[in-house]
Amino acid sequence: MNQNWTKSWRATESIVVWLQSRVLDFFSLVLCLIVAASLSLAGQSRSDVTPKINQESKKLPQCIVVLAPSLGEWLNELKVHRSRICGVTRHSSRYDWGRGKPIVGVYSKINLEKIVKIKPDLILATKNGNAPRQIRNIEKLGYQVEIFDSQSIQMIHQSILKLGKLLGHQKQAKDWLQQWQQKVNQLKRLRSKSKKALIQVGHDPLIVSGKQTYYSDLFSEIQLNNIFEFKEIRYFRPRVSSIVGNQPDIIFVLIDENYSKEKIRHYWKKFDFLSDQVLIIQDDTVLKPTLGMLDSLRRHLTAIQKNKKVSL
């Protein structure tokens, strides 16, 4: 009897939590509409308040809100002037292109009211980083939102061409693709033979790359074959036994400053036959699919070859 009551209570609790999230979304949207209406009543013309949508206009967007750091890095590499960026997410403010810009929230939770106040021409979002529900709410307010996918190298290239066309930087986009291939070729020249690699992108819990990621695509192209290439998912938590069973020749640990190198080294020391093949790259640049990522990888791989700490 008690077990049935507990199950019933948990089910009711889940429904309540779900309803609360929908109610919050609804009121957030209503609040944004009220803000827009109040601006209109304050004496601004309708053209000032209504989002400047570019879908039917040949005029290039001059006020862009960027909802992910990787997108801002792309703008920078395409030589889009920072004056055209009118809003960014919190972690973007560390970069030159995002410094001093209005912050519209974190990339997983956008403040719709701040979007309304900025009145952007264009909003750039990512398919896997930004919450689909929030993107839909922004679109309901009438703003042009362009969503980019960086799941694979092919999708990255398509996204760069799309971004260049949107912003009038087609030539820069084509140049970007040429530079990408040149930098990949430089990485290839650092490699002498094919090896099996584990691509770790998170720790505690341990998170690794499966098949459907640009890491897996890139590493395969430079003869570092992902041991979990057979996993038809992007990122997952592997069993230690599956790592040991697939016998990686090298373990790439790609992390930012929020992780402890010492803790990661201590973890891999438990596996004597693997510990000497661990390469920790603690650099925020390698976590975004940019030209800077390729430069960073080349610097680290070159340093490894000189020091001969890890066999490539």
Image (cartoon, helix red, strand yellow):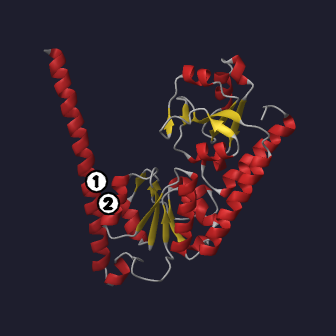
Q: SS for tag 2?
A: helix
Q: Is residue 79 visible?
A: no
Q: Is residue 220 visible?
A: yes
In the rendered view, would you say 65 is above or below 255? below
Marks 1 and 2, how far apart at CA: 8 Å
Mark on residue 137?
2
Query: Which residue type carries mark 2?
Result: Asn
Q: Nearer the viewer, residue 179 or 263?
A: 179
Mark nearer the N terminus (1 vs 2): 1
For badge 1, the amino acid type reads Asp
The percent coordinates of residue 217 (x first, y second) are: 60, 46
Percent position of residue 26, x then y:
24, 56
Which mark's residue is nearer the viewer, 1 or 2?
2
Pick the quarter of the image with the C terminus: top right
Contact flag, marks 1 and 2 (Cβ < 8 Å)? yes
Residue 84 vertical position relative to residue 98 in the rendered view, above or below:
below
Q: Is residue 116 above or below residue 219?
A: below
**In the rendered image, which quarter contains the N terminus?**
top left
Q: Which residue is mark 1?
A: 25
Nearest to the observer: residue 217 or residue 166: 217
Q: Could you classify mark 1 by the number of other residues whose Cα lies within 10 Å: few (under 14), some (14-19), or many (20 or more)?
A: some
Q: Quadrant of residue 33?
A: bottom left
* Left or right: 182, with 55 as reference point: right
Q: Position of residue 101 (x, y in %)?
A: 54, 65
* Residue lying at 64% horizontally and 28% vertically, measured from the top left: 264
Secondary element at image label 1: helix
Q: Residues within 10 Å of mark 2 (few under 14, many from 20)?
A: some
Across the whole image, how many numbered discs are drawn on residues? 2
Residue at the spot x=26%, y=68% of the render? 34
Asked where in the image residue 245 lies, by quadrant, the reply is: top right
Is residue 11 shown left or right of residue 50?
left
